Structure formats: C-alpha cells, structure tokens
C-alpha cells in the first residue's frame, strides 16, 4: 500500500476509535443513567433487553445484554453493506461497532448530571451525535440505522443519515410511548433530535460546495490530480479578466465539504495566486455521486 494511503487509513482508524469512544461516553454517562432510550437499532436492543430480562425474566441480569443484541442485529446489515457499499467502509464499521460494544460494557453507567433530565438530553445528544458524525467523516458508521442511512443516501440524494435515523426513531418512540410513560418517551425523543442535528453538522458529506477557480497556471496537472485524488469531475472554460483582459481558465467543481478541504490544498499547490470562490450548501441534482 502507498505510504500516503497507509497514513490516511491509520488516521481514519484513529477517528473511528475516537468517535466510537465519544458515543459510548454519551450513552453510558448521560443517556442510560437518566432512564432514556437510544434511537435506532441500539434503542430497539435496549427495548428487547427490558422485555427479555426485566419483564419476562428469561435471561439473567448478570451482564449487559444490549451490546450482544446490538452485535447480532448488525451482522446482516454489515453483510448488506459489504455487497452494496465500499468494503473498507464495512471494515471500519466493524471496528467501530466492536469498540462501542466493548466500551459500553466497560464504562460504568453512572450519571454525571444527577437528575437534570433536560441537560442530560442536550449533553448526551451532543456527545453521542458528534461521535457518530466523526465516524461518518472517517468513512465508517456506528452500525444499525447508520448503515441503512448510508445506503439510502447513496440512492436518494435529498436524504441524510440524520434524517433516516430521525424517521426510524419517530416510530420507535411512539412504541416507547405505548409501553412506558410519556416523560420517558418525550425526553428520549428530544435526545434523538439533538443527536441527529449534531450528527449531520459533523458529517461533511451531507454538505455540497460549488467551487469556481480562476487561474493563469497550466490546468492539466491540477485537473488530473483532482480526478485522481478526489475523483470529482472538472468543467473548464476559457475566460478573460474584465480589468486586465488577460486570458484565464475557469474551473467549475461540485464536491462535498470534506472534499473541498482537499481541493483547497491541491489548488494552492499548483497556483497559490488562484482566485477561488466557494458557495456552501449548493443544491445539486442529476448525475452527482453522494459518497460516504
């Protein structure tokens, strides 16, 4: 493997471990101690644990069954992702799910905020959602509905992973409302909404940028490196300066916000004096690939 690619993969794995740790901390220190339920597949596993252990007493309460159930439910989702999505994404997700499950079993379920339910919702949602957002930026997920969300957003460009999570959670929390008291369901839903917002804000691939570059430098080396390194198409136009009348080349590129960070480095490499404009939150339709 190329040294730069190896370094990049090591960096991604570091972010995966960080994101998984943040998620586990948010859940065990803020969400579960306050009596709230997570959303997504993990929330469904929490519900199954309550039914099997606390209500039906079919299994002993000697260890946290939630992590085991979460691992089992992720198995078919990971197989689907292996067939439909980048396989490196599946390996990273397997690492994140393993790290989450281990940390949630090791970190004690202990509230840092006492009985303050609102603050627990806010802090827990921000910490856990930011952790999942970091996972997605690193090209992984925390498993469960995040995997489903990535697969859906590759086909439906007007969706985001956070929105997929929120849609699933609406149904799940209605079920919580029937089975538990209204306060538990409402606070859990508030936590889920904050979690989804924090996730989408950190998941740069949900944000598309429109980049226009005006340069006098030879464009072929820059264009080829953009195509090779980032894999985005580049439209080129011949133009002239309105004041000087000198010929310039205009490059028009659509990329995710994450890819824009790489583009800025490449542009500066080939022409430090290039004139660059970046329009965030560009609405893109048609033949544009949304990536992990």
Image: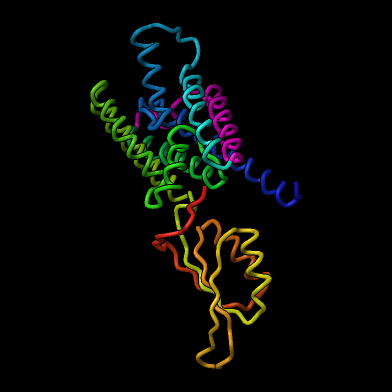
Residue 217 horizontal side relative to residue 78, left or right: right
Residue 96 is inside the magenta segment: yes
Q: State the residue in front, 195 or 203.
A: 203
Q: Residue at x 59, y 66 (%)?
A: 264
Residue 21 is inside the magenta segment: no
Instruction: Tally the numbered discs.
Output: 0
Q: Which residues are magenta?
A: 87-116
- Residue 285 appears in which quarter of the rendering? bottom left
Residue 207 horizontal side relative to residue 174, left or right: right
Residue 234 location in percent, x, y? 56, 68
Q: Residue at x 51, y 24 (%)?
A: 71
Q: State the residue in front, 213 or 55.
A: 213
**Which coloring applies here?**
rainbow
- Residue 120 appears in which quarter of the rendering? top left
Q: Residue at x 46, y 41 (%)?
A: 151
Please name the predominant secondary structure of the magenta segment in the image. Answer: helix
Residue 103 location in percent, x, y? 56, 27
Q: Is residue 194 above or below residue 173?
A: below
Q: Is residue 125 above or below residue 57?
A: below
Q: State the residue in front, 108 or 66.
A: 66
Q: Residue at x 50, y 13 (%)?
A: 63
Residue 111 location in percent, x, y? 43, 27
Residue 234 horizontal side relative to residue 196, left or right: right
Q: State the residue in front, 192 or 281.
A: 281
Residue 166 location in percent, x, y? 34, 40
């Amino acid at each position: 493997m190329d040294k730069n690619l190896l370094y990049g993969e090591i960096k991604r794995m570091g972010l995966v471990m960080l994101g998984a740790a943040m998620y586990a901390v948010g859940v065990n220190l803020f969400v579960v101690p306050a009596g709230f339920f997570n959303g997504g597949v993990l929330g469904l596993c929490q519900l199954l644990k309550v039914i099997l252990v606390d209500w039906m007493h079919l299994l002993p309460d000697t260890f946290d069954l939630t992590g085991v159930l979460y691992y089992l439910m992720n198995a078919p989702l990971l197989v689907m992702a292996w067939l439909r999505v980048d396989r490196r994404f599946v390996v990273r997700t397997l690492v994140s799910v393993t790290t989450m499950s281990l940390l949630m079993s090791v970190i004690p379920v202990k509230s840092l905020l006492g009985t303050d339910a609102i603050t627990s919702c806010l802090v827990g949602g921000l910490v856990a959602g930011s952790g999942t957002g970091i996972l997605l930026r690193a090209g992984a997920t925390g498993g469960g509905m995040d995997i489903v969300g990535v697969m859906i957003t590759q086909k439906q460009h007007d969706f985001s992973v956070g929105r997929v999570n929120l849609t699933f959670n609406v149904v799940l929390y209605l079920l919580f409302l029937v089975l538990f008291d209204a306060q538990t369901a409402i606070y859990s839903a508030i936590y889920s909404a904050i979690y989804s917002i924090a996730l989408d804000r950190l998941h740069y691939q949900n944000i598309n940028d429109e980049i226009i570059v005006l340069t006098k430098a030879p464009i072929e080396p820059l264009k080829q490196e953009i195509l090779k390194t980032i894999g985005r198409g580049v439209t080129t136009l011949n133009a002239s300066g309105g004041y000087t009348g000198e010929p310039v080349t205009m490059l028009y590129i659509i990329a995710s916000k994450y890819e824009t960070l790489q583009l800025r480095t490449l542009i500066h490499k080939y022409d430090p004096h290039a004139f660059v404009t970046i329009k965030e939150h560009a609405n893109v339709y048609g033949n544009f690939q949304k990536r992990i």
